[in-house]
Amino acid sequence: MIESNGNASIRIGVVGLGFAGETAIRGFQNVPGAEVVALAGLEEDRLASLGETYGIPHRYHSYEELVAHEGLDAISIGVPNMLHAPVALAALERGLHVLCEKPLAGTLEDAERMVRAARRVNRVLQVVFNHRERADIQLLKQYIDDGELGEIYYAKASWMRRAGIPGVGSWFVNKQLAGGGPLIDLGVHVLDLALYLMGEPSALTVSASTYQELGSRGIGFNRHAQKHGSEHLYEVEDLASAFMRLSNGATLLLEASWATHSSAQDDYGIILYGTRGGAEIRVRNYTTENTLTIYTERAGTPVDLHPHTRGGEFHAAVTRQFIKQIQRGAWSEMDGSEGLRRARIIEACYTSAARKQEIVLEE
């Protein structure tokens, strides 16, 4: 067990055999000082295949067996949302550091339990907000930190799909397993981007609506999505919209959809309005090249800047930061608080939509 700073190898167990699990494995294998030594998941063929492909010696069918593996220092969680909390809590009780796919948990109560546990045992709890590590987001953050936009007073964040419900009957469409639809799945990503770029203001009030109009009619499914499970009824929203008042006086409009009759393909982005300039990032179908525009003026004349951007480190940067934080020993600095703040806002959005009224959050 790593108990202080040092250069000893960090031994990791990965829970989950899907896209998130394999992405984590690849990320860690490219980080000096990290070693994936254990893997857990229910699908026996997939467990064997991933284990052999990536040379992972210890393989288990349950997360309980994995977290009990002697010599582990950390785990990475890539399972359905409602399993984040039980897996993380079991790992933290064993003294393991935790990297968790977004959202932090399927419910606010579970997210709070995870953060309390991380603080109690003084271990790292980090959420995978990998879209922050795009080149365009990092460049825009630099512009903002340098004061190029001035004070940002209004923002829009959206992730919209025309036909992108992830898998007919999959766990994604089950309310208990997923916690919600596109708001908790996609919306949490762009919510994170907006708050990150704006300097982490708190949300004071939330007014939201959710709609279940297309998925329940069999419209808007991604027929190519390969997700575990196929028997679940469609129980979640396919579109959500929320308006938030923030602690710094700014406001934020958030939209997320899996299915809409619109021109959207698989598009997300951020629009910021500031006192000295504005900015827009438009991403269509996950493109990373030349997506950023800066709006400003020179000598009283409007000027549009199109800085060249391409690529980004995505999950590779997240895994590197996770390992670096463990090695530094400053574990209390990363206790899941950012993920918890997003969870509170997402929960407030769902509550507002259900009650059809504005929700006031404690600052």
Image: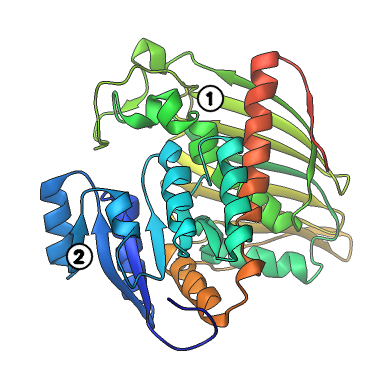
> In the shown orientation, is residue 113 left or right of residue 226?
right
What x and y, as percent, mark residue 342? Answer: 64, 44
Any part of residue 159 in sight: no
Of 204 and 55, which appears nearest the observer? 55
Would residue 133 appear left or right of 12 to someone viewing this image? right
Q: Which mark is residue 334?
A: none
Q: Position of residue 280 (x, y in %)?
A: 65, 51
> Residue flagged by tag 2: what amino acid is it?
His
Q: Nearer the viewer, residue 17 or 225?
A: 17
Asked which quadrant contains residue 315, the reply is: bottom left
Judge from the rendering whether residue 356 lies leftward or rightward of residue 112; answer left or right: right
Residue 178's quadrant in the figure?
Answer: top left
Which residue appears farthest toward the bottom when viewing the image?
Answer: 7
**Residue 21 at what x, y percent from top left?**
31, 55
Question: For this rendering, which residue is in front, 121 or 278?
Answer: 121
The answer to whether residue 264 is seen in the rendering is: yes
Amino acid bearing label 1: Leu
For image coordinates 17% across by 71% down, the residue present is 55
User: Of marks 1 and 2, which one's residue comes earlier in the chain?
Assistant: 2
Query: Which residue is the site of mark 1?
Result: 239
Q: Real-space Cα distance between discs 1 and 2? A: 41 Å
Whether 238 is drawn above or below 124: the answer is above
Q: Where residue 102 sits: x, y (%)?
A: 49, 48
Estimate how packed mark 1 is, as few (under 14), some (14 to 19) or many (20 or more) residues with alpha carbons within 10 Å. many
> Residue at position x 58%, y 58% from top?
118
> In this picture, is 163 found above or below 306?
above
The residue carrying mark 2 is 58
